[in-house]
Image: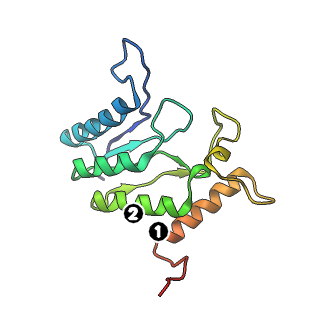
């Protein structure tokens, strides 16, 4: 049996004299460097946690695309994306682009959400559960819609 090892980064930053990660820019650039170094020592995976409303990584796909462009063998992914905050079609498009840039090395972890730092934070991203739906139901629906788009099913009629 082959064992694999990777890392999960929260990408936390704090503007403090003792921190070497003082800004969002620092955490993004250092995350790319960390993935390159991990690949260099033989690690198999580089995963990034996505968390909104905190000084942590919040926008996964630009980072994953950059990591994919700067590495060649390490698997890249998320742990996890809260689907209450994701437009399913934009998610599918962005994931597809990051996967193409990485040469098919993208692995996504998604969730229906967990306790947040703000009340109903997904509402500030423009999402609202449908009538009779909980926020977790909305996340499940948005995940299924993204999966349908990612496998290539048509969702809109082309205009001739």
Q: Residue 122 in the image: state x and y as whole percent.
A: 64, 46
Determine contact: label 2, label 1, CB under 8 Å: yes
Q: Secondary structure at mark 1?
A: helix
Left of 58 or right of it: where is 112?
right
| Residue that extends furthest to the right in the rendered view of this protein | 132
Which secondary structure, mark 2?
Answer: helix
Q: Is residue 147 above or below residue 2?
A: below
Instruction: Please state if 42 lies on the left or on the right of 56 as rendered.
Output: left
- Outermost residue toward the left in this view: 40
Spatial CA distance of label 2 from label 1 is 7 Å
* Residue 156, quarter of picture: bottom right
Q: Is residue 101 left or right of residue 154?
A: left
Residue carrying label 1: 150
**Which numbered disc flags the more N-terminal residue, 2 or 1?**
2
Residue, far bottom: 160
> Which sits in the foreground, 160 or 51?
160
- Residue 38, image x and y in percent? 25, 39
Give the residue displayed 41% in from the left and 33% down from the top: 11
Q: Residue furthest top?
A: 17
Q: Is residue 3 visible?
A: no
Any part of residue 99 in sight = yes
In this view, the residue in front, 151 or 121, is 121
Residue underneath mark 2: 96
Residue 59 vs residue 101: left or right?
right
């Amino acid at each position: 049996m082959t064992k694999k090892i990777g890392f999960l980064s929260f990408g936390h930053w704090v503007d403090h004299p003792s921190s070497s990660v003082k800004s969002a820019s620092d955490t993004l650039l250092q995350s790319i460097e960390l993935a390159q170094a991990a690949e260099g020592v033989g690690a198999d995976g580089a995963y990034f946690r996505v968390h909104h409303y905190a000084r942590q990584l919040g926008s996964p796909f630009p980072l994953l695309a950059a990591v994919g462009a700067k590495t060649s063998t390490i698997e890249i992914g998320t742990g996890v994306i809260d689907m209450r905050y994701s437009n399913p079609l934009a998610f599918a498009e962005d994931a597809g682009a990051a996967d193409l840039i990485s040469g098919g090395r993208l692995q996504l972890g998604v969730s229906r959400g967990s306790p947040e730092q703000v009340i109903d934070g997904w509402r500030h991203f423009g999402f609202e559960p449908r009538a009779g739906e909980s926020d977790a139901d909305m996340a499940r629906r948005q995940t299924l819609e993204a999966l349908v788009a990612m496998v290539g099913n048509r969702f809109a009629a082309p205009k001739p």
